[in-house]
Image: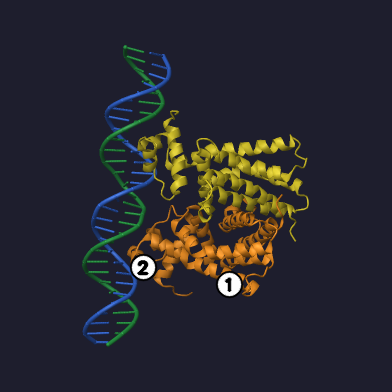
Chain colours: A orange, B yellow, C blue, D green
Amino acid sequence: MTTLSTKERILNSTENLIAENGFAELSIRKISLQAHTNLAAINYHFGNKQELINQVLERRLNNLFQVREKMLHDLNQGNKKMACNLEQILHAFIAPALYMINDKHQGGKVFMKVLARAYAEQSESLHELLANRYTPIIKEFAEAIHLACPDLPRETIFWRFHFLIGALTYAMGDFGASSMSKQMPESEYFNKSVEELIQFGVASLTSVSS
Amino acid sequence: MTTLSTKERILNSTENLIAENGFAELSIRKISLQAHTNLAAINYHFGNKQELINQVLERRLNNLFQVREKMLHDLNQGNKKMACNLEQILHAFIAPALYMINDKHQGGKVFMKVLARAYAEQSESLHELLANRYTPIIKEFAEAIHLACPDLPRETIFWRFHFLIGALTYAMGDFGASSMSKQMPESEYFNKSVEELIQFGVASLTSVSS
DNA sequence: TAGCAATTCAAACGCTTGTTTTAATTTTTA
DNA sequence: TAAAAATTAAAACAAGCGTTTGAATTGCTA
């Protein structure tokens, strides 16, 4: 039982509420109630509601992309021109999301739902973050995939990588879980998701289209 | 220039507003304004806001799934035991979404965004619709894919078909369009999306995983 | 420990929300 | 055409919204 700062409690509560009920029902009153703090504390620490949401996104997105980039760089050990295994590349992209999901406080798991919802809302904050800060990394991955799959035209790789991101977003948002038989425990379901997702990505990228 | 009933104008305006700004910003005042009608007309025709949203979903979802089912049945002409081409099966699932997108009044295109957002919001109405009414059709498609891909275990098919639905949802919601170079016109972008999506699905389902 | 800064708190502000009520109007039916 | 039903309209309702204010309280520093 660690004692978190008010700012952290607010960020965590916001994250939880977005994941549970979506942006439509999010209010700073609910946030402050769940965070055991005062209404005004939110405006004091974050200025306004929108900036709070931005920081919820930034907090974990920075970490997620850093880990992805490091794993990709570790693969070819600085030599960007060297082709490496497609499965490893996709693992470097997908697995960090898995790690987030499995973190002991489950904050990462919750965040992936937030991320999926921000995608769907076409959130301006998210769009700016992705466009301004993370496109270089996404391009690096696309380039690595191109080296691993020289037979696929660049355009096809572009499309399929984006579709894969779509499937990842969908899976991490747990959208399909409802329509799946609830036989396996939730943690197992998520692990299985990522495993299947990597295989899915490999399959879609190794088969040359007609 | 057709003259639409108040009820239809309300449904269309709701659809447009959800697609443009998401559920979070949706208000019946904005709806009534855009529909050129009165506030109370919404409650008069639909009871309440939630029921209005439900009917927005039902209106086009019924049609979408009916078309999908018909196209699938036309493939094997009543003989469910006959295996047919995987590409055709995926076409029967994906193309109806394309047709909706290309309908002359663009209502379908708008709806696909609504659908993507309802997914992300984990909308109860959508969940009930999918669970109660459309799971049989989804299972029929999964069964057809199984016959077309006898080498893939059923479980793998289940996962990949759901990932494909995720990618479809993502693409139809236009989530990725922002990160793609805006060189091609929007209509062309959507056509290209579906074409690539089918190839993507075929690729992911024909390659046997290790 | 005194003083200063950082933080928390209760209360209120103006505004928007979904819904209801009641009256006016249009459309349909007899 | 007269009565009845369906629809539209204006106004008000209570409740919730994000934000601001100014005082109370806490934590830190000198």
Q: Please rate how many residues cluster around mark 2, counting C-alpha atoms within 10 Å: few if below 14, some from 14 to 19, many from 20.
A: few
- Locate residue B39: give its quadrant: top left
Where is residue B115? Give x, y as percent: 53, 46
**Identity, as a three-letter code, of the amino acid under mark 2:** His
**Identity, as a three-letter code, of the amino acid under mark 1:** Lys
Q: Residue at x 62, y 36 (%)?
A: B66
Chain letter of disc 2 in the image: A
Where is residue B196? Give x, y as percent: 63, 49
Callouts 1 and 2 in the same chain: yes
Q: With B125 as the anchor, is A54 left or right in this view?
A: left
**Mark in front: 1 vs 2:** 1
Residue C6, above or below D7: below
Q: Residue at x 47, y 67 (%)?
A: A59
Give the structural element (helix, strand or loop) at label 1: helix
Choose between B64 and B109: the one closer to the eye.
Answer: B109
C-alpha gap between disc 1 and disc 2: 32 Å
Chain letter of disc 1 in the image: A
Residue B108 shows up from this direction = yes
Where is residue B4? Give x, y as percent: 44, 30
Where is residue B69? Give x, y as percent: 65, 38
> Which residue does the numbered mark 2 point to in the structure image?
A45
Q: With A82 as the anchor, is B13 left or right in this view?
A: left
Q: Residue at x 55, y 41 (%)?
A: B101
The answer to whether the residue labelled 1 contacts the one labelled 2, judged by CB atoms less than 8 Å apart, is: no
Residue B72, above or below B171: above
Give the structural element (helix, strand or loop) at label 2: helix
Residue B136 shows up from this direction = no
Numbered circle sitting on residue A70: 1
- Locate residue B48: give its quadrant: top left
